[in-house]
Amino acid sequence: MNWLLPRFLAGAVAMAVGGGLGHVLGEMAHAPLVGLWLGTLVGASAVALVDAVRGYRLMRWLSGALEGSAPRDTGFWGEMGYRIERAVVARDRTLSREQGRLAHFLSAIEASPNGVLLLDENDQIEWCNSVAADHFGLDPVRDKRQRVTNLVRAPAFVSYLQAGAFEQAVTIPDLRNRGTLSVYIRPYGDGLKLVLSLDITERERSEGMRRDFVANVSHEIRTPLTVLSGFIETMSNLPLTEVERRRVLTLMGQQTQRMQTLVADLLTLAQLEGSPRPPSDRWVAVSKLFGQAQADATALSMGRHQLSFAGADAAQLAGSESELMSAVGNLVTNAVRYTPEGGRIAVNWRIRDDGAGEVSVSDTGPGIAREHLPRLTERFYRVDGSRSRDTGGTGLGLSIVKHVVQRHGGELDIHSEIGKGSRFCLVLPAARVRFLEPAPDPRRAAPLLNDQTMSSN
Ligand code: ADP
């Protein structure tokens, strides 16, 4: 109230001075009382005029953008301007602090791997993060205030939103990215909704793979088991001659062997998945890998194929000996199993131009149609199921090879054409290759026997 007394005094002084002057002038005109009153009125009007000017200035500042400081007047208007200015500054400070907090909060939600969408009480979009925008195909700016069901038209989502029973999530297709989304709605506040979306494409895919895997394993085991139980029934119910008994026992042995191979392959896969990456400082001679593979191939082929192994020389590979043996062994035994009698199988080692080491296994077998190539390394994928089973295949060989080579940082290249044979190349990075003697010049590497084989076809 420190403005009240000066203001009162200023008014009183103005009126006194006005009244005094009016009185003096009024005496000259023989009307001192009229002069006194008029003078007082003029004094009061002068104070009111000053007030009006100051009030106008303050009003002008208030009705503007409230930028800068309020008019610096003395007295009532000055005090009022100062107080309003202080309130405005405090409000601006609070506002910018709150805006900072909001931005901080929104950027935290923005960083979420899940989609977040805020809906108002009319299911209109208030805000969404970029993940939700991507999941639902929305534009965070353009689609604000749009009704969500006009933009997200998946029937499952629309009926979920309309039913209002949000205890469970709903699964909808993510049309943009060709995947699957799991969407939850959580009501909050007064009719507002928080929509959370989660990309479950990968989860669904691995769940599907797991289901397929279990179904495949069950199928693979059930078949020999059915055969075995049939034989057991035959042996227990029918009197068999010695010859028949031997035949049945041989067939039972084959089925048992089939199951054993399957279990062994499954265990190998499980081991590959669960064990640490192969060492990069344990060296295996390529000639040793070739020696083992040659022994396996010779035993399996029993002289029905022409086999050749070349180029291993002094090369060594860093990694797990048993895994590399199993990978090369699988490729070589496949070549023997699928190549008809009289065919040729060539196993070569060479250094590629980029320094990577390559073990290639080529055959003059039937070849594989182009459409099968991308799926060959899938578990239980077979081009010719009966041929695979007849020759003791489990459908897991190439997936084991792929696993091994990937664990060693390499890749499996497959080249094949119907009627022109196949070439499977196990490629390991240069860092996993070394030579006990100076490295051979790649341009002078041993000629690819498999190329010769292929061209001779
Ligand atoms: P399998 O135990 O059935 O041989 P693999 O995973 O080793 O399983 O191979 C998958 C499929 O690829 C085989 O069923 C076969 O159809 C095809 N395949 C593999 N190697 C060859 C090859 N050298 N020549 C022709 N087809 C092959």
Image (cartoon, helix red, strand yellow):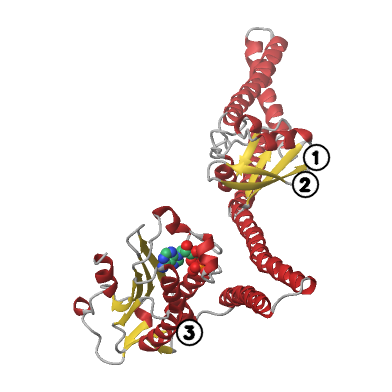
Asked if ligand 1 lies within 8 A of label 1, the reply is no
Question: Which numbered disc, 1 or 3, marks the residue that appears first in the sequence?
Answer: 1
256, above or below 437, in the image: above
Q: Which label is found at residue 168?
A: 2
92 on left or right of 294: right
Q: Position of residue 5 (x, y in %)?
A: 74, 36
For residue 250, side relative to residue 285 (left or right): right
**Residue 414 at least partly seen:** yes
| Residue where numbered disc 3 is placed | 320
Quadrant that contains the C terminus:
bottom left
> Disc 1 vs disc 3: which is toward the camera?
3
Per the image, the residue denoted by label 1 is: 165
Residue 196 at x, y percent in the picture: 68, 47
**Residue 122: x percent and y percent?**
71, 30
Q: Of all residues shown, which one is farthest toward the left?
A: 444
- Mark pair 3, 2: CA separation: 48 Å
Q: Is residue 377 visible?
A: no
Query: Mark 3 vs mark 2: which is more N-terminal?
Result: 2
Q: Locate residue 438: give its quadrant.
A: bottom left
SS at badge 1: loop
Q: Amino acid type of disc 1?
A: Ala
How many numbered circles are shown? 3
Q: Quadrant of residue 245?
A: bottom right
Helix, strand or loop at label 2? It is: loop
Mark 3 or mark 2: which is in front?
3
Amino acid type for the residue under numbered disc 2: Gln
Give the residue at the far bottom of this rendering: 436
Could you say which is closer to the camera, residue 299 or residue 73?
299
Identify the amino acid type marked 3.
Answer: Ser
Categorize mark 3 by other alpha carbons within 10 Å: few (<14), some (14-19), many (20+): many
Q: Which mark is residue 372?
A: none
